[in-house]
Image (cartoon, helix red, strand yellow):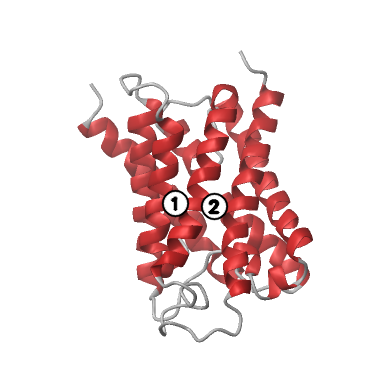
Amino acid sequence: MSTLSKKFLAELIGTWMLVTVGAGSAAVTLMLAEGEKKASAFNIGIGALGGLGDWLAIGLAFGIVIAAAIYIFGPVSGAHMNPAVTIALWIGKRFPAGEVIPYLLAQFAGASLGAATILVMLGNKGATVGGLGAPGPFPGMSITGVFIAELVGMFILMLTIMGIAVDKRAPQGWAGLMIGLIVAGLITTMGNVSGQGINPARTFGPVFVDSLVGGPNGWPVYWIYLLAPLIGAVMAVWVYDAVVKE
């Protein structure tokens, strides 16, 4: 049985890994594309180098690091690494109330440390050009469309988590791979709508550190990246219980 302190550290390190590698890949892509002719009016640099291939690369970076973190820390904390997952499992009576706050603190702290790590590696341009990989609405996309993209993405992700990691009937050993792959697919498909944050902590870390060092101001739209994933995750638990649960 893992102690709460070990679970806290597992969530902190896992979320740090997720942001450092995943959000870091988005920041690097934006820096590489600086000065390049944009492929269309619907991107801000990501897509200038390889169109949808840019999003596939970013999606795979997220998917690979998430899979690794799940296999490393899953036996310790369950490797939530996402406040929406933690809260949805608690609402669905699958997670103890006494551990919710420590998990959330660990996730937001880990994401902030991940963003700071990106800043140290890439320098100030990592923030001013790369935004430290913070997601945001893309040109031509409405706030409604961005909200729906975040809600739908988290809904699909949480359904996958329920079916492959939470349900006791799920085949063993596949959780990390399948969850990582679905995240990669979601980012590839909907990244150019909302950036596909689908994780309030993953979004908070880069937005917070950006605000300290002169990067883009993501606070005015942060409510979307907080609220939409929470709604999507809770909806997924309810739907899973209604349709799939024995």
User: Which residue matches tag 1?
Assistant: 229
Location of residue 143 in the rendering, given as x and y in whole percent from the top left corner: 41, 72
Q: Nearer the viewer, residue 8 or 171?
A: 171
Q: Which mark is residue 170?
A: none
> Could you tell me if the residues under marks 2 and 1 are in contact, i.e. CB atoms within 8 Å?
yes
Location of residue 117 in the rendering, given as x and y in whole percent from the top left corner: 74, 54
Is 154 placed above or below 212 here? Answer: above
| Residue extending farthest top | 1
Label 2: few (<14), some or many (≥20) within 10 Å?
many
Residue 205 left/right relative to 179 = right
Q: Which mark is residue 200?
A: 2
- Residue at x 44% of width, y 51% of height: 229
Q: Quadrant of residue 97 in the image?
A: top right
Residue 158 left/right relative to 115 = left
Secondary element at tag 2: helix
Label 1: few (<14), some or many (≥20) within 10 Å?
many
Question: What amino acid does circle 1 point to?
Answer: Pro
Is 42 placed above or below 89 here? Answer: below
Q: Quadrant of residue 180 in the image?
A: top left
Question: What amino acid does circle 2 point to?
Answer: Pro
Count of labels in the image = 2
Residue 100 left/right relative to 48 = right
Q: CA distance from mark 2 to mark 1?
A: 7 Å
Quadrant into which the N terminus falls: top right
Secondary element at tag 1: helix
Is 242 placed above or below 158 here? Answer: above
- Residue at x 53% of width, y 64% of height: 135
Q: Nearer the viewer, residue 90 or 8?
A: 8
Location of residue 74 in the rendering, given as x and y in whole percent from the top left corner: 54, 27
Q: Nearer the viewer, residue 163 or 72?
A: 72
Quadrant into which the C terminus falls: top left
